[in-house]
Amino acid sequence: MTTSLRTVPNRLSKTIHQTSKWGAKYKWGPQETETGMCRLSLSQEDKNVRDWFVKETKSLGCEVKIDQIGNIFAIYPGQKKGPPTGIGSHLDTQPTGGRYDGVLGVLAGLEVLRTFRDNNYTPQYPVAVVNWTNEEGARFPKSIMASSVWAGVSSLKDIYAIKSITDEKPVTVLEALESISYKGKTQANCNENPLKAHFELHIEQGPILEKETKKIGVVTSAQAYSWIGVNLKGRAQHTGTTPMDMRADPFLTAAKMTMAVNEIAERHLGLGSVAELHISPNVVNVIPKTAEFIIDIRHATDVGLENIENDIKRALENIVSDTEVILEFKRLFHNDAAHFDKSCIDIVQESASMIVGENKTIKMLSGAGHDSCSTTNANVPTAMIFIPSKGGISHNPTEYSSPEEIENGFKVLLNTIITYDARRTM
Amino acid sequence: MTTSLRTVPNRLSKTIHQTSKWGAKYKWGPQETETGMCRLSLSQEDKNVRDWFVKETKSLGCEVKIDQIGNIFAIYPGQKKGPPTGIGSHLDTQPTGGRYDGVLGVLAGLEVLRTFRDNNYTPQYPVAVVNWTNEEGARFPKSIMASSVWAGVSSLKDIYAIKSITDEKPVTVLEALESISYKGKTQANCNENPLKAHFELHIEQGPILEKETKKIGVVTSAQAYSWIGVNLKGRAQHTGTTPMDMRADPFLTAAKMTMAVNEIAERHLGLGSVAELHISPNVVNVIPKTAEFIIDIRHATDVGLENIENDIKRALENIVSDTEVILEFKRLFHNDAAHFDKSCIDIVQESASMIVGENKTIKMLSGAGHDSCSTTNANVPTAMIFIPSKGGISHNPTEYSSPEEIENGFKVLLNTIITYDARRTM
Ligand SMILES: NC(=O)NCCC(=O)O
Ligand SMILES: NC(=O)NCCC(=O)O
């Protein structure tokens, strides 16, 4: 049990705020820490925090492996050999993101290692802190991207070819990896470079913990979700001379589809959003030639998601059927609902109950996708710990969790890792 | 009557295609001429064609005046002094435009002057060929922009401050004028630098002449139109964690508004379009914080346009009323329906009947706005000549009018100018 290890109060919070200098943007409050982040995956800011993370973990005695898709494994040695117990999340952020989403999980992992070092504590087995590449899917439109490659769900070749959607001149994942020198040599493969388990501390990013006045969410599963890329081709024509009934207006079509996506998802008690769209030529008096957008749909169950996806496909076809707009769509991303590991969940629950009291914990579902979904896909026993997000706000510079909430989350993680390690028999 | 002046067959078409090198883009057919254009107002390509136009008209003996908003007046001397008879249009194009829209009118004016020179013909009064700046409103979102300044409808100061919407880093009109050295010294003012009349040859940009198998459109008026800028502010939030009923999604709101704009315009037998839109942050899994777009509405009558505009404003307010999205809108541009001058129209009709036969002419309304609307606003007697547009297509690289159609249009313009000049008494 962790109670025997001394921890340094609030050091984790300080680390979060100190390292926010790599990408800090969008000041929203008077405090120095009240500034959001833009640290897009594989950007210069991402390189800076990665370089620091590698140096920091090496100084604690870690062996650092970088795999072919830029995932960083900082492995703290144990008394025995064996696949490390993983603590993972991501250091990349949304373009208009906050300081906690993902960052908390990696730096809490680092804080676990620092606590080991401070206490001269050596776990039975190695413990790896993992920084997974492009979890957000913001720069390269595929979330939990590199953990999916590691899990064998996505092929390295396909992923290398994905183009960025946030750069003026799009670059591929491969080009971006090479440009910041994070295309490593370690196989991006859960068999070649395995983890024994995966634990992830994350902000909730939703409103439930706050509403229920709970301190820790014991996450049992994560929603199923898909991203569907839609390309509409119409006819560029003059807005002032083209009769309404002679148009092939792909943006009007996109507008109808956006409404349909929202309606269908709501009807199925899921989520549906269109948040990324490009029209061309994008001038006032030219009916666009093309509209391209990505649909994001989510549901707690795989069958619920399937129903939404099928209804949306029918709706898209229906909407174009009486127009001259040409429709193409394809699934860009899919992840089944992830069900975390019973014994890992139990250890999280045990630790959480000990640290904040059982009545301040709640078993819950994750709305967002996480790298822990990928490790579950790789059959690695996995569980997650949530702390509250103020106002349920995330993917927004004003995203906030208090130092106390962060400290709670860290202590639950630390206890979970020590307990899991202590119970490991191989 | 022009019949006495020798013309050089197809020289105008050749000039159109030769000068297309400044901005040629988007090859769509095997012929060299089957390529569209991107010559945005006050761009480097626009400077190149302007420099050539100035040199060319000077070599014909013109005095060239450049006004404060970059309008170029190339004035061919007459036997007597007096305000010149104007032939005007624009050399700027849409970002994905064709070779004829606007360009035809300016280069046909040049061809009139060349024909005068070839025939050693001196009109009674000076004839000015005018290249009006930013007619398209594509780069700077205000169409017939500089002719409106000249007409006293827009203030020079306001227009100088307009920011581009097609540049990665927006620039103002003033900065763009200065950067290509086309901020001239002549007052941009119809009283200080007057025209006696204004004639404009243009492609129809719509389907009517082709459908009716007519060769020349005698344009009697142009539609009223307005552009309304809409700003929507919502709340950036996670698409995967934010319940459908806790969202403030400005893009969903924009989609509903786009449908309303189309429906309302159609109901009033007018036109309504949303063709320019920016959402931010524009990534897959973040409900956007903002959506900004411009509505383009048109009607043959001022009262019809007013009805559309009022209904749209009510609809916009209605759509946001049960959301947390904040709506702001303002009119960016407005032009009343333009009614051209009876005696100028009569001369165009007379010339057209003579050249293509009366049964191949038709009196018609212009769907698009033109610099001739501005000269009408300045109380300058004005008329327009249309030639057919293949398939009614314009604001598209494949925009096309044949060499014969161009030759017809040119001859009608030449005859119109000579007739008008001959009948001028002061
Ligand atoms: N946690 C998180 O925001 N992940 C991004 C992937 C998603 O869209 O759910
Ligand atoms: N002729 C033309 O395309 N003018 C552009 C202004 C408009 O949108 O009508």
Image: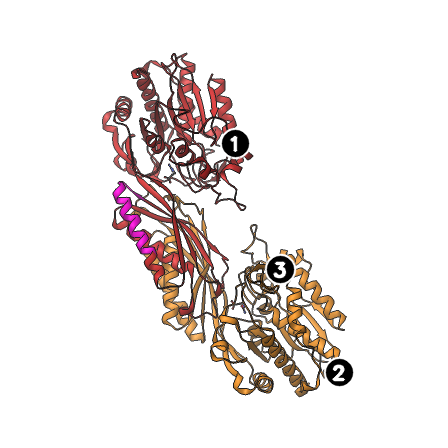
Chain colours: A red, B orange
Q: Chain of mark 1?
A: A
On screen, residue B344 above or below A147: below
Q: Is residue A380 magenta?
A: no
**Disc 1: CA contacts within 10 A as few (<14), some (14-19) or many (>=20):** many
Apparent side of residue B85 relative to residue B305 in the rendered image (left or right)? right
- Judged left or right of residue B56, residue B406 is left
Q: Amino acid at mark 3?
A: Gly
A82 over B368 or under it: above or below = above
Alpha-carbon distance for marks 2 and 3? Answer: 38 Å
Residue B205 visible within the image: no
Question: How much space separates mark 3 and mark 1, taking CA atoms?
Answer: 40 Å
Judging by the rendered image, the residue that carries numbered circle 3 is B23
Q: Secondary structure at mark 3?
A: loop
> Looking at the picture, do discs 1 and 2 lie on one chain?
no
Q: Amino acid at mark 2?
A: Gln
Mark 1 C-beta to ligand 1 under 8 Å: no
Q: Amino acid at mark 1?
A: Lys
- In depth, the one of B350 and A314 nearer the eye is A314
Residue furthest front as drawn: B30
Name the residue beneath numbered marker 2: B79
Q: Which residue is mark 1?
A: A47
Would you say the residues marked 1 and 2 are in contact, meaning their CB atoms lie under 8 Å apart?
no
